[in-house]
Amino acid sequence: MVIKTAEFVKSSGKWQECPEPTLPEYAFIGRSNVGKSSLINALMNHKDLAKTSGTPGKTQLINHFIINEKWYLTDLPGYGYARVSKTLRKDFENLIINYILNRKNLVNLFVLIDSRHTPQKIDIEFIEYCGESGIPFSLVFTKADKLKPNVVLANVEKYRQELLKTWEDLPEIYVTSAEKKTGGDEILAFISQTNQF
Ligand code: GTP
Ligand code: MG
């Protein structure tokens, strides 16, 4: 898919405030600092469409972008950020959960996972929650440039094995680096395939 236009639409503090669900939507989620905003910028070939930061907890609202005037791309706040108060963390989690359960035009949720780590409880729990709730999702491993390719593959395999303990089928898996701009074409191809753009 060629990205002709990518424009910011709005930030929403509640799922009810999101743009009218009139276009297909694809959202990016994952732990705080996993690289959601960076991956969105890499996919869109844009330096600072989505705001990024070395400090976790940068994205605190639901941010909608409209791509090629045909579909919505959504940058969500991260889950599991330990260094905010419990109440604030709960607020983020409620915002995310309400969004994914209620957003009618959501075609796919890309769940981002830091490829440097072995399976983390919070990610596994979130993935299982998506599965149990019938949310269509894919797994996207990020920051692959930080490790040797064989180590990345070994970490991905550990996730696959962990998920296969409870599931027969696994979702689509992508390995990406926003830094090196790798893996993005596959994600865009998937988005094209799931819609007639
Ligand atoms: P929150 O909005 O806080 O939840 O974070 P986020 O998931 O949007 O992460 P963000 O894109 O802001 O990136 C967090 C940090 O990781 C930044 O310092 C990025 O430069 C870095 N980063 C993101 N993607 C990559 C990548 O592919 N490779 C490398 N080396 N660093 C990355
Ligand atoms: Mg962000």
Image: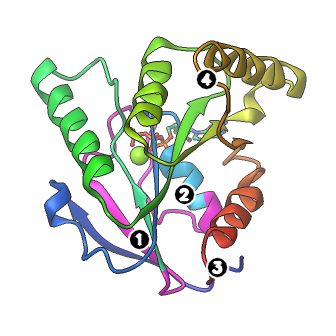
Numbered label attached to residue 3: 3
Mark 2–mark 1 contact, CB under 8 Å?
Answer: yes
The 10 Å Cα crowd at callout 2, few under 14, some 14 to 19, many 20 or more, is many
Magenta: predominant secondary structure element?
Answer: loop
How far is the residue under mark 2 from the one under mark 4? 29 Å
Specify whether residue 45 is in view.
no
Q: Earlier in the sequence, mark 1 or mark 4?
A: 1
Above-or-below relation of 147 to 140: above
User: Which mark is on residue 65?
Assistant: 1
* Amino acid at circle 3: Ile
Q: Earlier in the sequence, mark 2 or mark 3?
A: 3
- Which residue is depicted at the point 49% across and 62% down? 48
Marks 2 & 4, CB-CB < 8 Å contact: no
Residue at 27% of width from left, 19% of height from top? 83
The span shown in magenta is: 42-70
**Residue 154 position in % (x across, y down):** 81, 17
Q: Earlier in the sequence, mark 2 or mark 1?
A: 2
Residue 58 covered by magenta stretch? yes
Judged from the image, the secondary structure of the residue bearing numbered disc 1 is strand
> Could you say whether the residue bearing mark 3 is in a helix, strand or loop?
loop
Gap between marks 4 and 3 measured at Cα: 35 Å
Q: Disc 3 beta carbon < 8 A from ligand 1?
A: no
On the image, the x and y values in percent for residue 127 come to: 48, 29
**What label does residue 167 carry, if any?**
4
**Residue labelled 2 has its Cβ within 8 Å of some atom of ligand 1:** yes
Tell me, for residue 40, which label it has, or none: 2
Left or right side of 187 for 182: right
Query: Which mark is in front, 1 or 4?
Result: 4
Q: Is 47 or 39 nearer to us in this picture?
A: 39
